[in-house]
Image: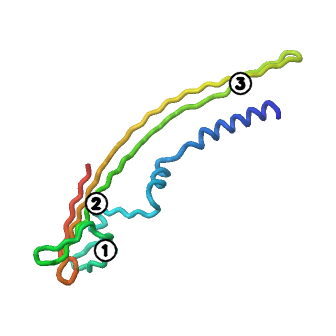
């Protein structure tokens, strides 16, 4: 192996070790959430729920309620109570190393050496947001939506 091919091999190995540990925030998010995740939002409630809608269609549109109860006249009331916490981390770190081939030749003797240098630096931030959504759906005697209300907050 010639000296220049050794240097090329070392440069490739260093580049691969630096790049292989990188993953984007989007890739991290995809690994922590399933391929299909439907979030309940005010917009979905406004779009999907209508007065007169059968309870079975509401269940398809919004899923199972957290609470099913009855009002003073014995009519069903469904309550969806959703709480979401989003935690976002942003970290960046820089660092690197350098390999320096130092060599010389004089007459029949030759000498070569490799010198290394490293540095590291990092910074980061963290954010936490909580959201709540409460949806109350009141049904009539025929199990059709009589009325519905919702409340959303974010802090």
CB atoms of marks 3 and 1 within 8 Å:
no
Quarter where residue 42 is shown: bottom left
Quarter where residue 98 is shown: top right
Q: Is residue 112 above or below residue 73?
A: above
Describe the element under mark 2 as helix, strand or loop. Answer: strand
Pick the front one: 144 or 76: 76
Describe the element under mark 1 as helix, strand or loop. Answer: helix
Q: Is residue 132 above or below residue 14?
A: below
- Specify the color scheme: rainbow
Residue linked to disc 3 = 114
**Which residue is pictured at 47% across the width and 37% down the height?**
92
Q: Residue furthest left?
A: 72
Neighbours of disc 3 within 10 Å: few (<14), some (14-19), many (20+): few
Pick the front one: 23 or 66: 66
x, y (%) of residue 22?
54, 43
**Which numbered tag is attached to residue 82?**
2
Pick the front one: 48 or 79: 79
Neighbours of disc 2 within 10 Å: few (<14), some (14-19), many (20+): some
Q: Residue furthest bottom?
A: 142
Pick the front one: 104 or 120: 120
In the picture, measured across the screen, residue 107 lies left or right of residue 9, that is: right
**Which residue is pictured at 28% across the width and 60% down the height?**
82
Quarter where residue 115 is shown: top right
Looking at marks 3 and 2 on the same chain, the residue that comes earlier in the sequence is marked by 2
Q: Is residue 118 above or below residue 68?
A: above
x, y (%) of residue 1?
82, 34
In the picture, measured across the screen, residue 79 lies left or right of residue 60, that is: left
Looking at marks 2 and 1 on the same chain, the residue that comes earlier in the sequence is marked by 1
CA gap between label 3 and label 1 equals 68 Å
Residue linked to disc 1 = 59
């Amino acid at each position: 192996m010639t000296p220049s091919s050794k240097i090329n091999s070392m440069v490739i190995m260093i580049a691969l070790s630096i790049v292989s540990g990188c993953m984007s925030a989007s890739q991290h998010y995809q690994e922590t959430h399933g391929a299909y995740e439907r979030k309940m939002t005010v917009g979905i409630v406004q779009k999907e729920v209508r007065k007169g809608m059968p309870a079975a269609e509401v269940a398809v549109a919004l899923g199972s309620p957290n609470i099913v109860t009855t009002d003073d006249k014995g009519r069903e009331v469904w309550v969806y109570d959703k709480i979401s916490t989003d935690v976002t981390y942003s970290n960046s770190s820089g660092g690197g190393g350098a390999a320096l081939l130092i060599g010389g030749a004089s007459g029949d003797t030759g000498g070569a050496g490799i010198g290394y240098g490293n540095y590291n630096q990092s910074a980061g931030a963290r954010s936490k947001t909580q959201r709540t959504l409460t949806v109350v759906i009141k049904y009539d005697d025929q199990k059709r939506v009589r009325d519905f209300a919702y409340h959303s907050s974010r802090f």
